[in-house]
Amino acid sequence: SSHRHYCDKFIKEIPLPASNMFSSLRYMNKPAARFAAETLVKSGTSSTKRGMSISALSGFEGKNFISIDQLSNEELRGLLDLSKKYRDTYGKGSSVDPTTAPKPLTGQSVSMIFQKRSTRTRVSTETGTNLLGGQALFLGPSDIQLGVNESMRDTALVLSRFNSVVLARVFSHNDILELSKHATVPVINALSDMHHPLQTLADLMALEDHFGDVRGKSLAWVGDGNNVLHDLMLGGAKLGMNIRVATPDGYEANEGVVETTKKLAAENGTEDVFLTKVASEAVKGSDVVVTDTWVSMGQESEYEKRVQEFDGYQVNASLMEQANPGAVFLHCLPRHPEEVSDEVFYSDQSLVFPEAENRMWTVMAVMAAQLGKL
């Protein structure tokens, strides 16, 4: 093949003085030498491709990050690859000394508005900002005047004078839209009742880590048609995944988001979005099974009603058997036993903890891209 010919040529042209890093190839048999050459070639190709995709983020500087559908396919690819680059550089398995690793956000700060509490969003953003050399400030309901004596507009204008980025985790999507309308620095939607784009980046990264290319894979959602589903549908379709959704009556996904997903599916050559009320119908033939909490923050009074209406939607071993061999499970956490059994949640099929870790690498990528610090 041309690839093999290139590697043979590569071996012949390697200079072999004792001081050269390739000098050990002198003592290899030819197959071993070829393998070493192929590894070097593939590694270089992979790095080149990643660098090219990340360069597509040059136009993302100064932009808000509100939902996945605002991204071009190239920007989505770039954010995922930048996230992987950061994991390779700053992750616990990295050989890079964290004290000498690049600090592209030195002198930058991010204010984090939290109307709704969270473990992963707060810890990932604070830790990730620190790894990149910046500073993150947690602003909870009792820390600032927002919603008490100060409007979202005034808060946006004030924080923009102090901080480089404003990240907000809110109840109403209108609050995110108001914040982004008036802020003069980039805004990140860390969750609203309509969208959760950071979670989707983490989910897609986990799936690519497991499967490699996810194009043609089928993703089944089982549960509430909520904010997490909205962006996962959009992002999955952009990467060429087939989307299958099962929701109980009255808990369907937003019609506008479904229509946008259908358009993206057509544009990216995937199957049409499959909608059903039966969990097993969505899961059958799927490669990924995803669920989320049935009772979100602020819906606690509906707990009994929701648990009753979601009967038959628990992801358990029996349901996972309907999926394709090798299917995996995702959940954005925190989870409850009525949503997924321990047998599935703690199984080898579950990617929930790598998925959770990816929340840090992906928010780091978004902040760096928004600030043009690539």
Image: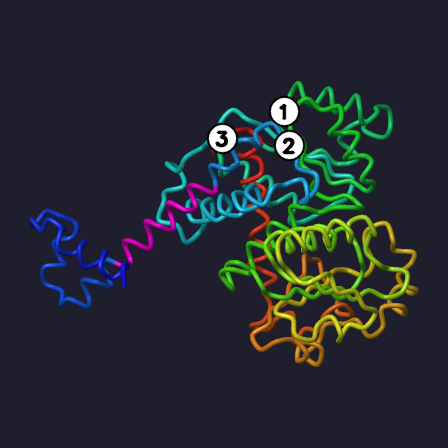
In the displayed structure image, the side of residue 32 where residue 271 appears, left or right: right
Q: Is residue 213 above or below residue 112?
A: below
Measured as percent of width and height from the top left, residue 368 is found at 53, 34
Q: Residue at x 10, y 49 (%)?
A: 15
Q: Quadrant of residue 175?
A: top right
Which class describes the residues within 10 Å of circle 1: few (<14), some (14-19), or many (20+)? some
- Residue matched to label 1: 163
Q: Residue at position x 80%, y 46% from top?
A: 193
Kindly indicate the quadrant of the structure image that contains residue 317.
bottom right
Instruction: Say whether residue 342 is left or right of residue 86.
Output: right
Q: Secondary structure at mark 2?
A: strand
Question: In the rendering, which numbered label is found on residue 109?
Answer: none
Residue 269, image x, y percentages: 62, 57
Residue denoted by label 3 = 373
Give me the C-alpha separation between circle 1 and circle 2: 9 Å
In the picture of the structure, the residue carrying the numbered disc 2 is 137
Check disc 3 and give the amino acid type.
Answer: Lys
Tell me, yes or no, whether the highlighted magenta stretch contains residue 44. yes
- Tell me, yes or no, whether the highlighted magenta stretch contains residue 210: no
Left or right of 244? Residue 2 is left
Q: Is 307 left or right of 213, judged from the image as shown?
A: right
Of discs 1 and 3, which sits in the foreground?
A: 3
Mark earlier in primary sequence (2, 3): 2
Tell me which segment is drawn in magenta: 38-53
| Circles 1 and 2: CB atoms closer than 8 Å | yes
Query: Which residue is at the front of the view, 45 or 171?
Result: 45
Label 1 amino acid? Asn
For marks 2 and 3, give the CA distance: 20 Å
Q: Residues within 10 Å of mark 3 (few under 14, many from 20)?
A: some
Camera-nearest label, 2 or 3: 3
